[in-house]
Amino acid sequence: MKIVIVTDAWYPQINGVVRTLDKVGKELQAVGHEIEYITPQGFASLPCPTYPEIKLCYNAGRKLARMIDSFQPCAIHIATEGPLGYATRRYCLRRKLPFTTAYHTRFPEYIRARFHIPAALTYALLRRFHRPSARIMVATESLHAELTRHGFRNLVTWSRGVDVDLFHPRDEPFLAFPRPIFLYVGRVAVEKNIGAFLDLPLEGTKLVVGDGPQLEELRHRYPEVRFTGVKHGEELACYYAASDVFVFPSRTDTFGLVVLEALASGLPVAGYPVMGPLDVIGGRGVGVLSDDLGAAARAALAIPREDCRRFALGYSWRASAEQFLGNLEPLPAGGVLHASGPDEPGVARKPLRPSGHSAPAARWWRMSAQK
């Protein structure tokens, strides 16, 4: 099966959206599917205000259409609500082609926190964006319920996974900081609510791994905190395994992949009882969720590390990829047609792929897995 995934979030950005799309794509490719990522790489772009590492593409319509037509996909998935996402949405609507979307990020809450724009306005714009989608993929049941209350329809669940081979407990010493070590990993930005963690009167060491627009401000405000910047791969995994508690202060994340990475490393989690943490670890005995974040962090020290590891083993990227594939909407038997229109004048109509390829996506997965 040939799948186009369009995303405005891609490397060198490091966040949950990028890691999810990359890992799921690799799982799909491993069983024979072909993935074409359409990302800001190769398009004219401008840096996003306050987030210069995020590239906002412009005038992407014609090139994007040529890329999709050339690849001849069996399904089209729009991962983000950015300029590339909008360009792909227009492409599909003009050709009357089905597509799926995903709701990864709680933009209304983020934009309200940063720019004080009412969330109701942003929700209205996002409803309009997602309305034509055959299915809107969301990470948790809580997010499903919240978006339903805001008038979204065609919602389906698409959970996440963790690389348990990379993130695992380690016996060798790595950090020589005073114990206990309370760790945060992720974007250093106002919407992550990191100040709530750094203000806690905790004994030992507070450690922040990551980068973002708030990094220099927090370094100045909290000179006693250890800020490492971004870490990757094996080095990042060592930071997880060498810490004592993972503190997740965000109140707006839809899932929190870093929570699974911490648990796979044998690290118990402390957080607020909100969407994301509640869905992943609520009542599972591998973390403590409380409106008193300091009390939760201290209580999490008593959780056995082997329980955290055992719980994380239940999350796999293979299962996430299977769920993603089953949520896709296959294109009609005739495939993509090159439609004449304002972006592609005079292009002849041509079938994208032969008929007979309209089996459900789950069947495609099983067929590929049997190869």
Image (tube, rainbow, N blue to C red):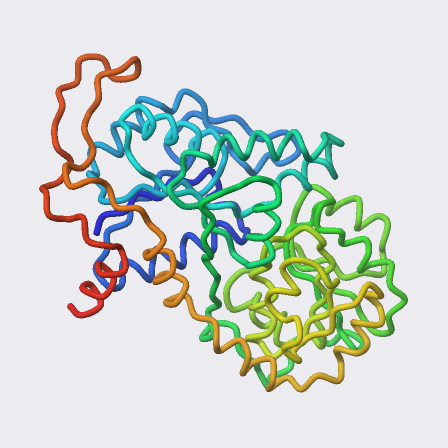
Q: If the image is split into quadrants, where does the C terminus sit?
A: bottom left
Identify the residue shown where x is 18% and y is 37%. 335
| Above or below for 49 versus 17 | above
**Residue 129 image position (x, y, % from top left):** 48, 32
Decide if residue 109 is on the left or right side of residue 55.
Answer: right
Viewer-proximal residue among 291 and 153: 153
Image vertical order of residue 201 relative to residue 36, above or below: below
Q: Viewer-proximal residue, 115 or 332?
A: 332
Picture quadrant where residue 344 is located? top left
Q: Residue at x 85, y 56 (%)?
A: 223
Query: Image check: 259 left or right of 44?
Result: right
Question: Looking at the image, which residue is at 35% across and 23% down?
Answer: 61
Total numbered badges shown on the rendered structure: 0
Image location of residue 138, percent across then percent down: 50, 52
Which residue occupies 48% across, 76% down?
Answer: 314
Instruction: In the rendered view, tell whether residue 246 sits above or below residue 311.
Output: above
Residue 58: % across, % down = 45, 23
Q: Is residue 222 above or below residue 173?
A: above
Q: Quadrant of residue 119?
A: top right
Which of the 4 image quadrants contains residue 125? Answer: top right
Q: Position of residue 120 (x, y in %)?
A: 67, 33
In this picture, residue 358 sits left or right of residue 157: left
